[in-house]
């Protein structure tokens, strides 16, 4: 909990500083008539969303599950990510339209103001990076750090564009760089859309190899088969698993030991924090012929469920049980 509180404080500070960068670049872009600066401000807006979502995810992880949200509130962040992606698409279209217009009819740009604004943005973003680096073990913080680092590179490109305009007067560099930044934003937006759709479709997280999960379960002592295996993500960091395992005829205590052993190993190897494992012995599901969608088995099963046990999956510093 203390680690989550520290990470949340760092993200709030980083979010405030990034909002300052956004204001500076918007003002500088409007004053200097630089589309590249305005495009970079659009890229900074992606950082604001990324930092905001990361902070939101940490804050939501502190809320306990209740009667209405038995898995907690992690998926609210997915809805926010959809809004994020939609906003980015609008920004890309606006930048692209204005860049094409300026390629046809170039507009004067104040190179000195562009350079000064971009350098100020780089300085503030450098402070954001220093603020976030302390939480490099947190996946949310690492993702936000990558966003801000990319923005520093984008601002450096704006500095180069301002220098070219100041030294040569070649105005086409401004809309050309803007198009490059727009492509970069579109790429980021597509990544968000792809991940969000996969989460909403309850797809298997890309980092999870179902074959490896099956092998891990099948290789467990007393386990003779596994089926109805499902792995999905509750959020970008919270993974769940459910399956049926067939074990040799054994006592209830032995069956529970098998399940507890599986919980620990699935958490250690795959960071799967929520597991629901149905144990079958004398009448495996494969012997029952039931129709599509029917899942009421006329035989007795033992089901064991696990609360989040892995520190990475559960946002806790407690060791796996």
Image (cartoon, rainbow, N blue to C red):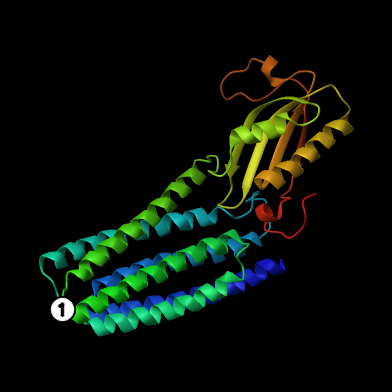
Mark 1 surroundings within 10 Å by alpha-carbon count, few (fewer than 14), some (14 through 19), many (20 or more): some
Q: Quadrant of residue 250?
A: top right
Q: Secondary structure at mark 1?
A: loop
Res 45 visible = yes
Location of the N terminus by quadrant is bottom right
Residue under the point 56% across and 61% down: 140
Q: Quadrant of residue 57?
A: bottom right
Q: Label 1, on which residue?
A: 108
**Where's residue 150, x and y in %?**
42, 65
Q: Is residue 130 left or right of residue 276?
A: left
Q: Position of residue 193 (x, y in %)?
A: 42, 50
- In the shown orientation, is residue 94 left or right of residue 205? left
Foreground pick, 193 / 117: 117
Question: Toward the viewer: 256 or 59?
Answer: 256
Image x and y of residue 77, in percent? 52, 57
Q: What residue sits 54% from the left and 77% below the top?
A: 13
- Left or right? Give the position of 43 relative to 205: left
């Amino acid at each position: 909990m203390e680690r989550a509180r520290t990470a949340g404080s760092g993200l709030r500070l980083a979010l405030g500083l990034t909002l300052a960068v956004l204001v500076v670049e918007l003002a500088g872009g409007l004053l200097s008539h630089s589309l590249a600066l305005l495009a970079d401000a659009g890229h900074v807006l992606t950082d604001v969303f990324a930092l905001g979502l990361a902070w939101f995810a940490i804050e939501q992880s502190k809320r306990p599950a209740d009667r209405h949200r038995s898995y907690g509130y992690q998926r609210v962040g997915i809805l926010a990510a959809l809004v994020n992606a939609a906003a980015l698409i609008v920004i890309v279209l606006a930048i692209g339209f204005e860049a094409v217009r300026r390629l046809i009819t170039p507009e004067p740009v104040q190179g000195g103001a562009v350079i000064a604004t971009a350098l100020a943005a780089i300085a503030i973003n450098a402070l954001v990076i220093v603020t976030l680096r302390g939480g490099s073990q947190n996946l949310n913080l690492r993702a936000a750090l990558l966003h801000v680092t990319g923005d520093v590179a984008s601002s450096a490109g704006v500095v180069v564009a301002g220098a070219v305009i100041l030294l040569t007067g070649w105005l086409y560099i401004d809309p050309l760089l803007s198009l490059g930044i727009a492509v970069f934003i579109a790429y980021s937006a597509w990544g968000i859309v792809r991940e969000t759709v996969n989460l909403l479709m309850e797809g298997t997280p890309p980092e999870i190899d179902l074959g490896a999960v099956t092998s891990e379960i099948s290789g467990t002592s007393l386990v003779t088969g596994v089926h109805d295996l499902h792995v999905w993500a509750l959020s970008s960091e919270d993974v769940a698993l459910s399956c049926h395992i067939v074990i040799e005829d054994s006592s209830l205590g032995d069956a529970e030991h098998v399940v507890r052993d599986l919980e620990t190993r699935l958490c250690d190897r795959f960071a799967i924090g929520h597991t629901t494992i149905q144990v079958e012995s004398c009448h495996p599901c494969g012997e029952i012929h039931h129709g599509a969608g029917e899942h009421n088995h006329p035989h007795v099963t033992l089901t064991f469920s696990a609360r989040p046990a892995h520190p990475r999956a559960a946002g806790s510093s407690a060791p796996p049980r």
